[in-house]
Amino acid sequence: MNLTITLAGHTADWRFRDSAALGSWLALAPWQGRGEVRVVRISSAELAPTFLAGLRREVRAHDDGRSGVAFHEVGTADRAGGLPAAVADLLEVPPGLNRFEVIQETARRLSGRPGVVLVPPAAGSAPPRPQALDEARDWLQRLRKADAGVQAAVLLLDTSRQRLGATVFDLSVGLPVDRLLAGPGANAGALWRGYLHHRLAWESAGDPERAARAQSAVARLSAGADADFERLLNDTARAAHDALPGAVRQDAKQYLEERVKPTRTRGWLTQRAADLEQQRLLWRPRGATANHVPAPWLARAFLLARAVPVCELPLRDCLVCAPLAHELLDRCFDLEGQERAALWAARSDSAPPDRAVERWQSFREPSSFQAALYPPGCPARPEDAWPFATFGEFLSVLAPEGPRRDAWYDLLNLRNHVAHGHYVAWAAVEKLRQVEDVLLA
């Protein structure tokens, strides 16, 4: 499920950790047949209306008008009496009936048309009720016993701090899916706002609510004021870090140190990671399969305070906005491939660089690691030394001079900067624009 979110004056679609899993489940039309009860985790109760609207759109899209699915959305204020009472009230079941009669009448009114019951999370500081999941399953079974024609699915929304179950569709962590970078001549103002959106999404560890809290200050920045933006990120990270209880900060530091120099069991690490993720201090970026890592804002605060010296290298990695870095690297590879092809076509009788010849000879050895990566019969298998020349070697041999030389070396250095895991900021985006303006003119 994607949601359209606006940050810093830029609108983008966000995709969440379990968007694909939720879509696969909805494709089975669980509101038909016996129905199911599932939990959807979101980042905060305040965002429930946005997610509920998105869920309704997704259900309608998967239903495609085949069943005429109906929606029964419980209000937050209606939850005090429990799900059966809330849905009975929605369906205008007459008051004064006993529990059995309420079930009978609710089943009668739900029978004949598939439906989805949407239940928002508890608002504010209301205590979590883990038993709500079992109560919903029991309620649905009793409805089916009362009337076999009842076809319904129940979606219970919860949050990381008010959990209803361990098995959920996790929509609490997301990131923009829209591509940020445009070609040459892109509008600088629009690009800057998109850059701010992507960076805020990353710094907030994919939490749209946390990202939204910073956007009012970000919106006051002038285009390209990246030093001011960096200062704002630092101030926000320090404030969030200082607001944490001392014991929680210590737990996070201890976990990071144990990841680097383990002295405790894997079970301890797993449990501590789960606890810190529930508190939104660790996260797993959407699509990532690696271990939990610190939320970028927390990593930033630790680096600013030099609080965990042994972990400074992985903490710096946490600040690299991976989606933006990947997009920059993709564009660099595309441009490099274009320039390599043009230079190679114009090579005339130029001999390949000596280092490329050495790599070519190594490739031809029977035990070559790289050669083994090519399947037998692959037409892309290198037939001479030129495919083994680095871009810098290409330039030194085939383009020692020329009006595009500065752009070529800027491209080479930018690609290396990003590929080696360095920080990606506005300067990198601007440098790519400058290179594209020359090479794609």
Image: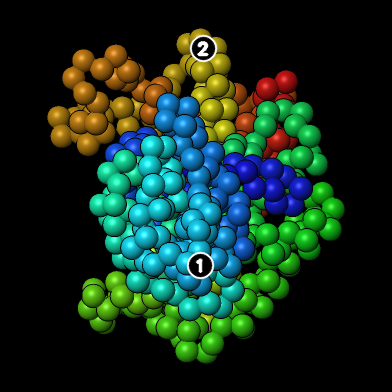
Q: Secondary structure at mark 1?
A: helix
Q: Residue 366 or 222: which is nearer the viewer?
A: 222
In the displayed orientation, state which residue is furthest to the bottom.
246
What's the coloring here? rainbow
Q: Residue 121 or 432: which is nearer the viewer?
A: 121
| Among numbered discs 2 and 1, the one appearing first in the sequence | 1
Q: Which mark is residue 345?
A: 2
| Quarter of the image where the C terminus is located | top right
Q: In the shown orientation, is residue 147 left or right of residue 179?
A: left
The residue lying at 56 percent from left, 78 percent from top is: 125
Amino acid type, callout 2:
Ala
Q: Secondary structure at mark 2?
A: helix
Q: Which residue is mark 1?
A: 79
Tell me residue 264's x, y (percent). 25, 81
Residue 306 visible? The answer is no
Tell me residue 290's x, y (percent). 35, 57
The quarter of the picture where residue 327 lies is top right
Q: Residue 7 or 322: which is nearer the viewer?
A: 7
Q: Residues within 10 Å of mark 2 (few under 14, many from 20)?
A: few
How far apart are the alpha carbons under marks 2 and 1? Answer: 71 Å
Name the mark nearer the viewer: 2 or 1. Answer: 1
Amino acid type, callout 1:
Arg
Q: Which mark is residue 173?
A: none
Q: Residue 112, relative to residue 192: is it above or below?
A: above
The residue lying at 61 percent from left, 83 percent from top is: 243
